[in-house]
Image (cartoon, helix red, strand yellow):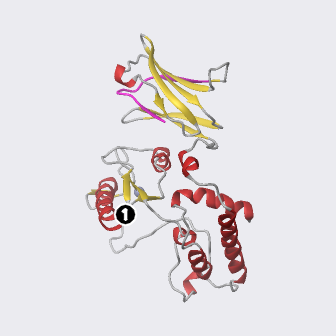
Amino acid sequence: VVIKATNPVAYAAKLLEKKGNQPRRLYIDFKNSYIEPRYRSPVPIADGLLKRIRTGQFSKETVRVVLDIESIESYNIFSLPDPFRVVVDMRGEKRSMTSSAKQAPPQTTREKAHEETLITVLREKRKNRPQGKTDAEDPDGPELSLAQQLGLGVRRIVIDPGHGGRDPGAIGNGLQEKDVVLLLAKKVRQQLIQELHCEVILTRETDTYLSLEERTAIANGNNADLFVSLHLNAHTRPEVNGMETYYLSLSSSNEAMRVAAFENATSELQMSDLEDVLKGIMQNS
Ligand SMILES: [Zn+2]
């Protein structure tokens, strides 16, 4: 939850335990503040972590923001400058209230068996891998992505242009990383929409600073299937060039990856279901 203010302001937070029909709640008081009436209506959340957020002019000089809690395990509250805002980072198990849980059909025995097959295949192939052989020596072609291995579709992509605002990123040739990645993100968005008909969300549209928590919150809050963070590096030697891509991978053998991709080709799952799939794999390994 991000609460923006027009100017830096002193704030204090307090957690109240459930009492009678009052739910467990976290309230934040902003001193010497005023909230416009149009922002005073409650915001329903109902995502399994929070029930809703209420805002109001608590007293003449204090604005109070109340987060009615459904179920959270821990939280972290901090402020960020330019523009001033208070960020509440909450963690916990999302319960049955989550929208994905509501939409997802109950897992059938067949699907369960299918998942177990994938796990077995990955383990078997890893065992069979010849000692000392690296991926670079593997003649079977390029590695398959995690999404390909798990047969997951990608429909909604969050593109994150790195840095922004007071954080320029790398600087070189009179260019700033934050400006180039923003331009690049907008071009990539256009191309993805035109060619792949994907839904694309940018973490920032302008030259503004975002914390890493805010960036990932945008991806998770939108239930994105893919999160791509764009960065550019600079080097003092002009002849240095190249490209690097970091991604999460499960399997270390090309053959195992191809088998997994083939096995999962008909999967109905989306990339946003990855967390549940990974949990299943962890529990079975
Ligand atoms: Zn960067």
Q: Residue 130: image x %, image y %?
A: 69, 86
The residue most toward the top is: 60
Q: Quadrant of the C terminus?
A: bottom right
The residue most toward the left is: 174
- Give the residues drawn in magenta, as a range: 1-15
Residue beneath label 1, please?
A: 234
* Residue at position x 59%, y 26% in the image: 25
Q: Quadrant of residue 166?
A: top left
Q: Is residue 208 above or below residue 283?
A: above
Numbered-mark total: 1
Between 24 and 90, the one nearer to me in the picture: 24
Which amino acid lies under the numbered mark 1 shown in the image of this protein?
Answer: Ala
Q: Is residue 48 visible?
A: yes
Between 150 and 144, the one nearer to me in the picture: 150
Label 1 crowd bin: few (<14), some (14–19), many (20+), radius 10 Å: some
Q: Is residue 264 magenta?
A: no
Q: Residue 34: image x %, image y %?
A: 38, 18
Q: Quadrant of residue 70?
A: top right
Q: Is residue 36 visible?
A: no
Q: Quadrant of residue 19?
A: top right
Mark 1 lies within 8 Å of ligand 1 (Cβ measured): no
User: Which SS class for mark 1?
Assistant: loop
Q: Residue 10: image x %, image y %?
A: 46, 22
* Residue at position x 32%, y 71% in the image: 238
Q: Is residue 10 above or below residue 105?
A: above
